[in-house]
């Protein structure tokens, strides 16, 4: 299946991938109408994906004549293209700090999650342990007294963290008691209607962390 030529916004998405999920969550938080085409890594590939994306990978966003294929680039583009509600701060200092948080989440935790998403490295207990310990070591940041990550309102940082946290128990990552603030924060995100709207059928079947 390929995207319809009549659509304004279209997304090629892996139904299991956290990187694809974070883009779908941004779309849901902003209430953007989008045509979704699910692409399995080992399944048939859409005919035009290689033309749109030199790596022929997901997520790939199509907005009329524009094609974007890096998840962070896609999310930031959507926030600028559809500014309400904003998911990134307006002032340069706060915006830079938020980008730095997202960069650290990607480098420290998404890096480990990517190993768990690959069948050949999924069974390594050291990866699960490192991810659990990393989240537990940051528990005090999640216990700021604010409903979202260092914020009164939902932000791009939450849209980056939520797909990762949703997958923890699915991949056997057990958070220690010290990570209780992380679990409480995750539950608040999981209760949001846009989060439910962002889930594919495959993601709905993933067990939530307790």
Image (cartoon, grey):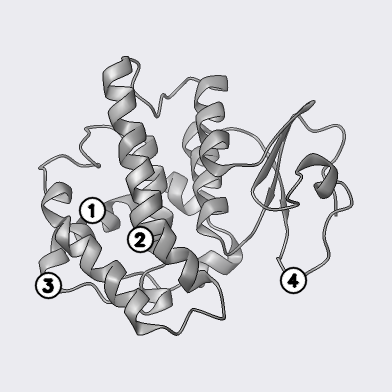
Residue 10 or residue 194, whichever sits in front = 10
Cα–Cα gap, marks 1 and 2: 10 Å
Residue drawn at 85 percent across, 49 percent down: 2
In-image side of 8 versus 169 (left or right): right
Question: In which quadrant will I find the N terminus?
Answer: bottom right
Pointer 4: what residue? 42
Pointer 3: what residue? 177
Cα–Cα gap, marks 3 and 2: 16 Å
Mark 1 vs mark 2: give the one in front: 2
| Label 3 vs 1, first from the N-terminus | 3
Q: Are marks 1 and 4 in contact (CB under 8 Å)?
A: no
Q: Which mark is residue 185?
A: 1
Residue count near mark 3 (Cα–Cα under 10 Å), binned few <14, some 14–19, many ≥20: few
Question: In which quadrant will I find the C terminus?
Answer: bottom left
Quadrant housing residue 35:
top right
Q: Which mark is residue 7?
A: none
């Amino acid at each position: 299946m390929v995207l319809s030529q009549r659509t304004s916004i279209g997304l090629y998405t892996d139904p299991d991938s956290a990187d694809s999920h974070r883009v779908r969550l941004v779309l849901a938080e902003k209430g953007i109408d989008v045509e979704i085409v699910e692409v399995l890594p080992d399944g048939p590939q859409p005919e035009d994906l290689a033309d749109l994306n030199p790596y022929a990978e997901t997520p790939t966003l199509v907005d009329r004549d524009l094609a974007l294929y890096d998840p962070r680039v896609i999310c930031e583009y959507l926030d600028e293209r559809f500014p309400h509600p904003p998911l990134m701060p307006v002032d340069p200092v706060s915006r830079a700090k938020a980008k730095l948080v997202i960069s650290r989440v990607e480098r420290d935790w998404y890096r480990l999650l990517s190993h768990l998403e690959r069948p050949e490295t999924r069974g390594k207990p050291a990866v699960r342990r490192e991810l659990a310990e990393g989240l537990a070591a940051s528990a005090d940041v999640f216990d700021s007294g604010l409903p979202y990550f260092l914020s009164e309102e939902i932000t791009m940082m939450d849209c980056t963290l939520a797909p990762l946290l949703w997958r923890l128990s699915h991949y056997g990552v057990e958070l220690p008691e010290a990570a209780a603030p992380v679990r409480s924060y995750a539950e608040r995100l999981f209760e949001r209607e846009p989060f439910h709207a962002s889930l594919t059928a495959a993601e709905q079947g993933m067990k939530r962390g307790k």
